[in-house]
Image (cartoon, rainbow, N blue to C red):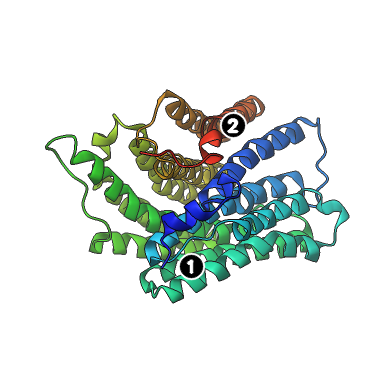
Amino acid sequence: MTSTAEQMRAWQGPAILSFGFRPFFLGAAVWAALAMALWVLSLSGALTLPSAFDPVTWHAHEFLFGYLAAVIAGFLLTAVPNWTGRLPILGWPLGGLFALWVLGRIAVLVSAGLPPLLVAVADLAMPVALAAVLGREIVAGRNWRNLIVLVMLVVFTLGNAVFHWEAARDGYAAQGFGLRIGLGATMMMIGVIGGRIIPSFTRNWLVRQGPGRLPTPPMQRFDKLSLLALLAALLLWVAAPGWALTAILLLAAALLHTVRLSRWAGERSLPEPLLWVLHLGYAFVPLGALAMAAEILWPGILGAAGGQHLWMAGAIGLMTIAVMTRATLGHTGQPLTAGKGTAAIYLALLTAVLARLAAAVWVDQAPALYTLAGIAWIGGYAGYAALYGPLLMRQRAKR
């Protein structure tokens, strides 16, 4: 049977189509920077987007269901072959999946001139095809343990479909069920996948650094309890985001996941940015839950959007860039350590998160803070494209 390495060597086309992370991570970074630039121009009144979505709805959709869908695709198309022992999707089939994602971005951007159903079909084509491909691989590889990841991808895609339905019905979906379904599914992905890789990567690095505290092994009973609490809180938040009981469950989930994070020896990871950014990104899961609970109990303290951005920009932004940088280094044959450029990318995105949070607190300074957040976000993702793009577009380094 042909091995993964042999299949990759046999591919004679563009290097960027030789593994799933390559086109999707680069595309995600470029789109994250470009979409933010369009959003900043739209906010300033310098640009009117040709989208049927209002600017806030378009912004929310493109960073949750546009950018993140590409990162999820790149991650899963790279990880699932390792999980199942089957061959990766590469070459023109991979290029076709990526083309479907690009088609979705174009369709949503110019949707003012298109039927809503056509826009939804174009946008949903890639995640539906991805779910079908990964479902086939997981079943064929009898990798039942990771069916949960496929289920979360299906729920995420369902959230996108509901988002389109809400946008077509009343034009404003930025605070609707679809967004909450998609965001809730994403927080569970971070909880499950992050809960596996963060303690494992941290342990692997720490055992080479000398004696000291090591992370608790992943997926112990406490981890499962924490995930169940998060699931319960998110289900109620999707269904009833203003209930006091929702706030109580969110507070419980925030406490449990703070304790869970503390068990992973994150304080020892500070010398290596590739590690501390994972711990920092995960910290925004409980911080976001805490902020959402506070907004329910004391309306107006941050605003619903302010709290959600701790999840969307903080947890999603930092966790995805952490995975993108680490996977790119590892799969292109580079040393697993972050240089100054990579650390600058992380700090730029952290600046964007903090500036967006500050805008929710100091409302009178919000326009300037929005601009700062946007510029820092663009800088972070443009920095990834500039620094990691050449690695993604050439063959793996020989060792």
Q: Residues within 10 Å of mark 2 (few under 14, many from 20)?
A: many
Q: Any mark on residue 286, and which?
A: none
- The answer to which of 250 and 30 lies nearer the viewer is 30
Residue 247 visible in the snapshot:
no
Which residue is denoted by mark 1 in the rendering? 150
The image shows residue 115 at horizontal and vertical percentages of 85, 62
Quadrant of the rendering where the C terminus is positioned: top left
Q: Are circles 2 and 1 on residues that touch, CB within 8 Å? A: no
Q: Residues within 10 Å of mark 1 (few under 14, many from 20)?
A: some
Spot the residue most to the left. Answer: 211
Q: Is residue 301 above or below residue 195?
A: above
Kind of residue sitting beneath label 1: Leu
Identify the residue shown where x is 54% and y is 46%: 22
Identify the residue shown where x is 30% and y is 64%: 224
Total of numbered circles in the picture? 2
Q: Is residue 345 left or right of residue 275?
A: right
The image shows residue 82 at horizontal and vertical percentages of 39, 60
Kind of residue sitting beneath label 2: Ala
- The answer to which of 173 and 103 lies nearer the viewer is 103
The image shows residue 32 at horizontal and vertical percentages of 62, 40
Q: Secondary structure at mark 2?
A: helix
- The answer to which of 56 and 72 lies nearer the viewer is 72
Q: Quadrant of residue 398?
A: top left
> Which of marks 1 and 2 precedes in the sequence?
1
Residue 373 visible in the snapshot:
yes
Q: Secondary structure at mark 1?
A: helix
Which residue is denoted by mark 2 in the rendering? 382
What distance separates the C-alpha of mark 2 from that of mark 1? Answer: 30 Å
Q: Is residue 359 above or below residue 126?
A: above
Quadrant of the rendering where the N terminus is positioned: bottom left
The image shows residue 350 at horizontal and vertical percentages of 48, 32
